[in-house]
Image (tube, rainbow, N blue to C red):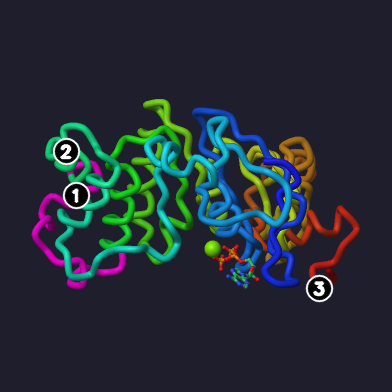
Amino acid sequence: MEGLTKYYGDFPALVNVNLRVDRGIIFGLLGPNGSGKTTLIKAMVGALKPTSGWVRVMGMDPLLHRRDLSRYIGYMPQSYALYEDLTVEDNIRFFAQILEVDNLEKRILKTLQFVELTDRVKMPVYALSGGLKRRVSFAIAVVHDPDILFLDEPTAAVDPYLREKFWRGLKSLKESGKTIFVSTHLMEEAVKCDIIGILFRGRLLMISTPQELFRVGRLKVELHIHGDVVRVDLPNDPQTIAGFLKQYGLKDEIKEISFRFPDLDEIIISIFRRMGYERSEN
Ligand SMILES: Nc1ncnc2c1ncn2[C@@H]1O[C@H](COP(=O)(O)OP(=O)(O)OP(=O)(O)O)[C@@H](O)[C@H]1O
Ligand SMILES: [Mg+2]
């Protein structure tokens, strides 16, 4: 995408976003509430018309070639669109039929196994828990075996155990050659991506690896020694940390060392400071 800009009325939800995502990676889109993640994903799946700028997905304009593209992309919206009165199986079948999936029944079964819903096939969606509904929505995104997945906060309100499992699923899809574009506001998910982009107030502030991102934030270190507590903020690089610890040696008096990595908000604030902004300003 280049120069991608979206105004809702006179509100700028995306401002001049330039981004290129290579095939076969997991790209994580990070940003706080209202930063424009959903708007950006909608522009990529052809669900929204940009005010200016352009988007191409596999070389196609998602607005002009929505139908052709739908065979190659899977989309899991943030607010899932399921038929509450239909069963799990019929929801998946309905979307698979629209996309004219080959070997329909075999593919549905395989998808149900992949998302681990085989024991719920006959249940109406209204009777499922929130986490299970998300799984149905994920099943719909992958049933036609797409090359690219757009997942908008797929693990919101999913417990840590299932979240971990879900990410293992994403890793296996990546290993089979898929490209995954996923939005989140969780740091623990960001570290699982190959490349991440940080969106803030509609602007893409930074594109980097998660490792680079961690170096932006300062590490909070606490050292308990001689009954005292030493607290410092250090740049998050191994040399500095080793240098700091060295002055204390390996003494028995050290009772506890703790490190705390900055959370996403702290990192966004440091990036903003580095760029000469404050969060409260526009
Ligand atoms: N249809 C709309 N009309 C007017 N404003 C909108 C519309 N959709 C989104 N916005 C505004 O655009 C901004 C970006 O919204 P968007 O949903 O893209 O953010 P997000 O990063 O996905 O947030 P969240 O983490 O809460 O899902 C927000 O300020 C939102 O209120
Ligand atoms: Mg959103």
Picture quarter with the C terminus: bottom right
Name, please, the residue furthest toward the front.
Answer: 64
Q: Residue at x 29, y 38 (%)?
A: 144
Name, please, the residue furthest toward the right.
Answer: 276
Q: Is residue 52 magenta?
A: no
For disc 2, the marked residue is: 104
Q: Is residue 128 magenta?
A: yes
Label number found at residue 93: 1
Q: Is residue 279 placed above or below 37 in the rendered structure? A: below
Q: Position of residue 177 (x, y in %)?
A: 42, 26
Query: For ligand 2, which image quadrant applies?
Result: bottom right
Q: Is residue 258 visible?
A: no
Picture quarter with the N terminus: top right
For disc 3, the marked residue is: 280
The reply to whether callout 1 and callout 2 are in contact (CB within 8 Å) is yes
Give the residue type that dot 2 points to. Answer: Leu
Judging depth in this view, the residue of 124 and 207 nearest the camera is 124
Q: CA distance from mark 3 to mark 1?
A: 47 Å
Could you tell me which secondary element the residue under label 3 belongs to?
loop
Judging depth in this view, the residue of 53 and 127 nearest the camera is 53
Q: Is residue 131 placed above or below 183 in the rendered structure? A: below
> Which residues are the magenta region?
113-131
Q: Residue at x 72, y 63 (%)?
A: 201
Q: Earlier in the sequence, mark 3 or mark 1?
A: 1
Give the residue type that dot 1 points to. Answer: Arg
Q: Position of residue 179 (x, y in %)?
A: 47, 34
